[in-house]
Amino acid sequence: MRRSSELRALNIPIADELAKRSGSRPRVRPAECEPYAVAGVVPTLVFSPRTVAEASKIVTALAAEGASIAIRGAGTKSYRPPHPHALDVVLESSRCAGISNYTPADLTMTVAAGTPLHVVQETLRPYGQFFPVDPPFAAQTTIGGTLSAGSAGALRQRYGAPRDNVLGMRVCLGDGAIAFTGARVVKSVAGYDIPKLFVGASGTLGFIGEVTLKVAPLPRCEAGVAATFVRCEEACEAARRIAASPLLPMATTLHDGHTRRHIRALGSSSQPWTLLVRCGGSRSAVLRQQEGVIASMRACGAATIETLDADRLHFCWQDVVEAAGGAAYPADRTLVLAIGSLPTQVADVCASITALLPAAEITAHPATGIVYAHVPWPGAGDPSAPHERRLAERAARSLLEQFSAQGHHVKVLSAPVELGTLVAPLSQSAPVALMRRVKAALDPNGTFDPGRFVAGI
Amino acid sequence: MFDGLVQRLAAIVGPDHVTTAPGDLSNYQYDGSADSALPQVVVMPGSAEEVTAIVSACTAAGCPYVARGAGTGLSGGAVAEAGGAVIAMARLNRILEIDCANRLAIVEPGVVNAHISDAVRAHGLQFVPDPSSQAVCTIGGNLAENSGGLHCLAYGVTSHHVLGCEIVTPDGELVWLGGRAYDAPGYDLLGVFIGSEGTLGIATKVVVKLMPLQEDRRTLLAAFPTVEQASGAVSAIIASGIIPAALEMMDQLSTKAVEAYVNAGFPTDAGAVVIVELEGLRGTLEELVQDVQRICIAHGSREVRQARDEAERERIWLGRKSAFGAMGRLGSSYYVQDGVIPRTKLPEVVSEVAAIAERYGLLIANVFHAGDGNLHPLIVFDERTPGDYERTVAAGADILRACVRHGGSISGEHGIGIEKRDCMTLQFKAADLDLMARLRAAFNPRGLCNPGKLFPTSRRCGESARTVARGALAPEMVDAAGPAF
Ligand SMILES: Cc1cc2nc3c(=O)[nH]c(=O)nc-3n(C[C@H](O)[C@H](O)[C@H](O)COP(=O)(O)OP(=O)(O)OC[C@H]3O[C@@H](n4cnc5c(N)ncnc54)[C@H](O)[C@@H]3O)c2cc1C
């Protein structure tokens, strides 16, 4: 990495040169760059390319200077640890936006990566379609950011994850090379399925310029069922029965009392756990799903069961997605963990979290085995109880170790500055050497966010 | 040639599981494509550790190697073009674990596709990808080719149904990509491994997802005066928000051939037939059936027939699955092409295919996975007629050119392998291929793992004269209904 002071000295000539060559003038003044800070670290330069070709010119010039580049969408993942020590350049995608192709009957849409997800959804809706992912920060997140973060919401239960709904991409690699990978049709096995590599890579392999998405028809009808349970295990058992049945609902989420409070449409409950099932399909299918879901909930000992019509369900869902590592929690003051486990392990994972971090607030996707824990954290400047904070930090670290040792897939999605080095240990059989070589192949100079991916990649 | 390698392999797997006998080797020279090459040695590991040792021994000896499942691949993937070792997965055929509560199974790569669903059906579960070769093809081959099947339209192809796999890397390391649970940290190496045609390493265990069986299904057969009208109906069904479990189309040449072969009840005076299969909960499908009927009639269908019982349904599918067997009777050989187009382009591409048939003086029938725009034009030719063979390959290449021109892909499910590697340049520019080459080098730096596949050589697309499917498939590759693709 280039020393920031050096880069700042250079930045004016570079900026001028790049403005000439790429047509994109960077932000150079600290005040202009501050909104693009990553975990409080302000970059020296901020570039906003309009196309992947512009991005390539910028990357080529900066890589030659030895600068490091962090790629940014809407910036909703800025507190993902490890936090950077210094930051040369932010390459942000907001001007690289727009929908270039959409043929409803083909179920495909090609969009520039900086396009906000909600714009994509609003374009699709009049045609009775949607991009079937429900990541958090729904109001801000960009397509490129959603994919780079790999954030799958509860819709994965029926529709698969973002990786399963991406067909092709145009990317700029670490040496400035521009490549198209994948295809623009719904089915293709020509060549390696490299788009999947960029999904979840947190921008460490290249800049995604344009993406072809596989979209889906919106179900003709939707409705929900919400039930409360005394015991977490009962709720999880109900979720598993539903998922193993032919009902095929769209999604299932589980909330403790804290995360339930974020769901305005539900109101409060005296029971500790709430299971929410989103049903969708033809009118008769939705009725059958609701019946079957209610029967499973009842058989598993639900304390209360209520049905939700489509409007109330959608109002619920706005909050549900934000209560899973999303806008319900301030990123700079919350530790957010995501644990990938098996459906049968969800209740144990929840219990382990609460045992070590009693303040944790939990949302889970019990049909797919994902648990999100949100631990409120006082700001670093907060003088209160440093001792308790240290204890909590120790508890968080041992929780991560325990989960990794149990074979769960653990990620720290977000952490306050104080915990900026907190990362989950990797399992023994993780293909670290291969990942390093893949990184070196696509980003040979280590330009994109060096050291900030798993295993220090 | 590879000094002492055979002895080392024998020491790893035991002498009974290595062979260099010419008679044995010749059993491994083909897959389901026209390409063939003799390996120098065939080795059959019995465990992941043995695969690791084999890969290390081959690497030390500088010997190329290729994994082989059932050898039903249609693009030459399992053919040891560079000689060397074939690592046959036949002994790695155990289902190691079935976890119904978590809806997953862990299997060895040599397990036959259909055996997974057979093993879990009693629990109301299934492994969804159902290539027509499922009675023999292996999960390792499915993974390598990212295979699809008739019922992948609604539920996705192999990559949607695999959670993880243990692989031996070409460096001889045993690692896990993905796992039992979702969201393994780091790059999605599982995602790129699937569909990598055996060029990035050898899978030794596979975690597959299991899906609940559906309660009910309805099968409809709609006849249309023209392929254009049938295509319009297909697009309209999808645009209306209905994603059937299967949505297939056959043109008149195919239906006529089928009716002369098996009695499937296809109307042979129709320009095209469309088969729609809807799946779902009992008592919920009527609404969708009516919509599909209405759409078909609005697009000119004269007749939409619903199978009244399982016997009639089976007859319809028998007809679909017999298409290629039936075509095979029209000439001495046939060549199955596999291309994809945006489904709204079906009418244009179909008329281009007809023009290509005319230009080359060849008979081309069309069978489509219409729901996802995957074409399987079937070119009939006579091996004994000089020049027929070359024209067939050239016509096949022209069809791929048409697919790419319309924004599509040169393969929907059969893979690139040897057969289509020189056509990769139709779809990908040098920089795109370079990205793939970088990835291959990251996994497979010495290039010994299934060399020569997938990447273009110096030949032109359509020039390589060997890439013609053999007319007759080995009987064990074909289920009772005949090959269906
Ligand atoms: C009659 C017939 C019908 C077919 N229908 C369909 C269809 O409907 N849909 C479809 O998609 N395909 C179809 N195919 C193609 C073929 O069956 C599939 O590609 C299948 O997945 C190949 O499996 P296999 O076990 O025969 O693999 P093989 O042909 O033995 O090998 C295929 C590739 O997989 C690699 N491989 C095998 N095992 C491993 C392993 N353990 N690790 C890494 N790489 C490995 C090989 O090196 C090779 O590159 C059909 C073929 C036939 C003959």
Image (cartoon, rainbow, N blue to C red):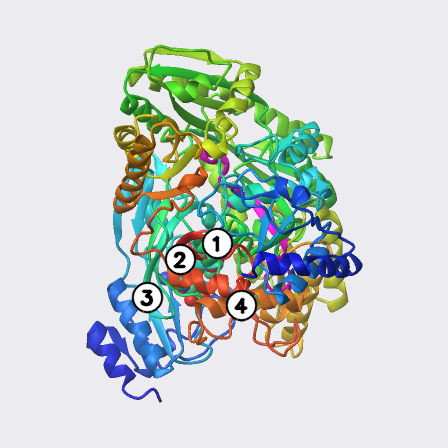
- Asked if labels 1 and 2 touch by Cβ distance under 8 angstroms, the answer is yes
Give x and y (percent) for residue A418.
Answer: 41, 40
Q: Is residue A115 above or below residue B436?
A: above
Q: Are there few (<14), some (14-19), or many (20+) residues within 10 Å of tag 3?
A: some
Mark 2: secondary structure: loop
Relative placement, left or right, of A33 versus B313 is right
The answer to whether the beta carbon of the residue marked 2 is less than 8 Å from any atom of ligand 1 is yes
**Magenta stretch: includes residue A178:** yes
Of badges 3 and 1, nearer the viewer stands: 3
Q: Residue at x 58, y 56 (%)?
A: A4
Q: CA distance from mark 2 to mark 3?
A: 26 Å
Question: Residue B137 shows which numbered tag?
Answer: 2
Q: Which residue is mark 4?
A: B438
The answer to whether the beta carbon of the residue marked 1 is less than 8 Å from any atom of ligand 1 is yes
Question: Residue A307 shows which numbered tag?
Answer: none
Please check whether the numbered discs 2 and 1 fall on a single chain: yes
Q: Which residue is mark 1?
A: B147
Q: CA distance from mark 3 to mark 1?
A: 26 Å
Q: Earlier in the sequence, mark 4 or mark 1?
A: 1
Q: Quadrant of ligand 1?
A: bottom left
Please check whether the numbered discs 2 and 3 fall on a single chain: yes
Q: Earlier in the sequence, mark 3 or mark 1?
A: 1
Q: CA distance from mark 2 to mark 4?
A: 30 Å
Q: Residue at x 50, y 28 (%)?
A: A321
Q: Are there few (<14), some (14-19), or many (20+) residues within 10 Å of tag 4?
A: some
Three-letter code, disc 2: Cys
Image quarter (top left, top right, bottom left or bottom right) of the C terminus of chain A: bottom left
Q: Is residue A125 above or below residue B163?
A: above
For the record, the magenta segment spans: A155-180
| Chain to which mark 1 belongs | B
